[in-house]
Image (cartoon, rainbow, N blue to C red):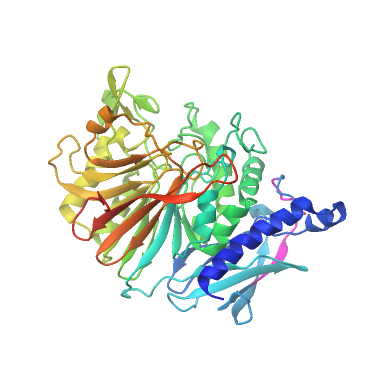
Amino acid sequence: MNRRSFLYLTSASLMLDVARRRWASPAMARRLAAYPFQLGVASGDPAPDGFVLWTRLAVDTTRGDGGIPPTPISVRWELATDASMRRIVTSGIATATPELGHSVHVEVAGLAPQREYFYRFMTNDATSAVGRSRTAPAPGAKIDRLRFAVASCQNYEHGFYHAHRDIAQTDMDAVLFLGDYIYEYRSKDRPRVHTLPALQSLDDYRTCYAQYHADPDLQAAHAAHPWIVTFDDHEVEDNWAGAIDRDGSSPAAFLPRRAAAFQAFYENMPLRHTSVPTGPDMQSFRTVAYGQLAQFTVIDTRQYRSDQPCGDNFKPSCDARLLESATMLGATQETWLANALATSTAQWNIVANQVMVQQLRQQRNGRETVNMDQWDGYPAARTRLTDFLAARRPNNPVFVTGDTHQTWVGDVKVNFDDQKSRTVATELVGTSITSGGDGSMKNRFSDANLADNPHIVYNNDQRGYFLCDLTPRAMTSALRVADRVTTRDGQITTAAQFITETGRPGVHLAG
């Protein structure tokens, strides 16, 4: 079985399994309800010698405890070089404990670099679906091509995961997911409905993740490729900043909720043990290398930032916005990021970032406003970053970003107020998987506003993701969009392609 056939059959078989459950007889439904792998399987954080394997046991996806008894359960895992799981190369036993939501995180090591593997889990008489993963190339290895997806913002209520179906059926090396994997509230008049109206406790967050993981297209995308994940705001609460929630509650009131949210995030993602939360704190910034070709530098723009100045969302500027002490990353992470980029020898430095770096001026009610939740709200911190890029010149920096539910492609400048200022990086701000509903080919951003932001070369309001191809010479990024997400029959096509050439910061439309 070749890789493309495996990807297609994985996606198709998962959807067929859901259909069988939907139309099963009552006796058959009761038997299938005891199946413990209803949340699927996943892998993540690939290294040259291994990756993380993940699953979480559940027989009832509407409950935070998954309907699993509160006792440890032994789970066998197997890794093979073939999709039929005949050529087993390693295996072991993991323990799924109630303290971690009966999740399983296996850090496999000792594998060959840049090689495809297949895996599955077993407990009692049940066997999971087969997943596919792939190790990274050896350190310093010369590779000709790397393909990866960039995705974010998948509000379950706002639509169906056609983008994930497309990701599952597309040959690629990895998926970068930049945050807003879940949403913590219930919307109105949407095609799908959250099980819970709002999230506060660990049990609430576990229930929400179970509902998302039960989606067949999301399961297929996880099973088909290794994921590199991080969080943004909705994994905890909309627009939280550091120890402050959206409403400005005290840290004492907010941090227990952040601790519950972080634990649930770890339980439900293919993350390494280094990311196990300690109370309300979680280590998420890290690097993932792909030979000489690329380094993914994953940053955290939530946990260490100052509270948003001047209020939240789009506001006119105020004195607090201009403070040198305002930070997006915190001092420790700023130093870490500078070192990670300065010491990188990769041909491409892909920075996995949550909120928009480019300046975005907008006129609202006759006044210029900026989004205080994005890097616009922290101009001193952004200047420190762009000045570093200008001075140290790491190879081909590209920011890949989520959050906005629109696509913004443009150039990162040393000084955005001077169009002749030096371009130091490219930014691809990806749209959402579903958040915001169907969207429109007609941009929400006016021509006048675009004229105020000449560094932006493209804007689009449809749902979808980026499919990026890296070679030593160029990065080509295809914007894959859905014609609709609010019905099950949506189709994915390519809306535009963008090129960044090696040694030439900035981006332009292909063709």
Nearest the eye: 26 or 509: 509
Q: Is residue 293 magenta?
A: no
Q: Is residue 179 left or right of residue 341?
A: right
Residue 470, horizontal then vertical, whole percent? 32, 63
Is 302 above or below relative to 48?
Answer: above
Q: Residue at x 45, y 62 (%)?
A: 174
Q: Quadrant of the N terminus?
A: bottom right
Nearest the eye: 466 or 346: 466
Q: Residue furthest right?
A: 27
Q: Residue at x 31, y 58 (%)?
A: 476
Is 15 above or below relative to 196?
Answer: below
Q: Is residue 212 left or right of residue 346?
A: right
Q: Which residues are magenta?
A: 64-77
Q: Residue furthest left?
A: 420
Q: Is residue 253 left or right of residue 376?
A: right
Q: Is residue 75 magenta?
A: yes
Residue 357, horizontal then vertical, whole percent? 30, 42
**To which quarter of the image does residue 356 belong?**
top left
* Dominant secondary-structure state across the stretch colored magenta: loop
Q: Is residue 147 visible?
A: yes
Is 357 above or below relative to 286?
Answer: above
Is 143 above or below relative to 270?
Answer: below
Residue 293, horizontal then vertical, whole percent? 31, 67
Q: Residue furthest top?
A: 365
